[in-house]
Image: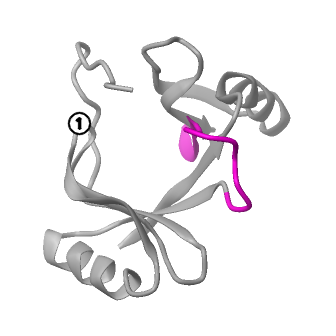
Amino acid sequence: MAVIGVGLYVTGSMEAVKLYCEAFQMELGYHVLRQDGKGYYHSELSRDGEPALSVVEAEHTAGHNPVQLGITFADKAALEKAFALLRPGGEIEMKPQSLPWSPWAACLRDRFGVRWFLSLPQHQPGEDFVPEV
């Protein structure tokens, strides 16, 4: 298991990406715009070729904790165990499921208010991928 980075859920994601790239000498890598073109459905920023941040347009005004920590697991059983341990007293944001960029992933906020993105090793979806949002 390894920390894969930090996800930021913000209002004004396109502006945020420009700012973070300039401020932290990062580059915008793989990214998908929302269907309405008003922000990123998903974006990846890197520095010196190393992944650093993911920036996503928040579905609502950013709350008190717009940061999400990502953990990659070696297998589905380990991911499911972590999800089960973090779930009590927390809030499920996305039940474990297959995603275009991960064979199995889940999102939740634990009872301490920390947001987690749990996933198996990621991959990029095909060029024809269009988000539903």
* Residue displayed at 29% across by 32% down: 124
Q: Quadrant of the N terminus?
A: bottom left
Amino acid at pointer 1: Pro
Q: Which residue is mark 1?
A: 100
In depth, the one of 119 and 111 nearer the eye is 111
- Left or right: 78 with respect to 109? left
x and y percentages locating residue 3 in the rendered image: 48, 66
In depth, the one of 50 and 21 nearer the eye is 21
- Left or right: 126 with respect to 20? left
Say above or below: 48 vs 85. above
Q: Secondary structure at mark 1?
A: loop
- Residue bounds of the magenta highlight: 49-65
- How packed mark 1 is, by other alpha carbons closer than 10 Å (few <14, some 14-19, many 20 or more), is some
x and y percentages locating residue 80 in the rendered image: 21, 76
Q: Which color scheme did the rendering employ for the protein?
A: one colour
Query: Does residue 40 show up magenta in the picture?
Result: no
- Left or right: 63 with respect to 56? right
Q: Quadrant of the C terminus?
A: top left
Say above or below: 57 vs 85. above
- Left or right: 96 with respect to 21? left
* Residue displayed at 42% across by 66% down: 108
Query: Does residue 55 show up magenta in the picture?
Result: yes
Residue 89's image quarter? bottom left
* Residue displayed at 69% across by 47% down: 62
x and y percentages locating residue 104 in the rendered image: 20, 56
* Residue displayed at 59% across by 26% down: 28
| Count of numbered circles on the image | 1
Say above or below: 7 vs 28. below
x and y percentages locating residue 64 in the rendered image: 74, 61
In depth, the one of 25 and 80 nearer the eye is 80
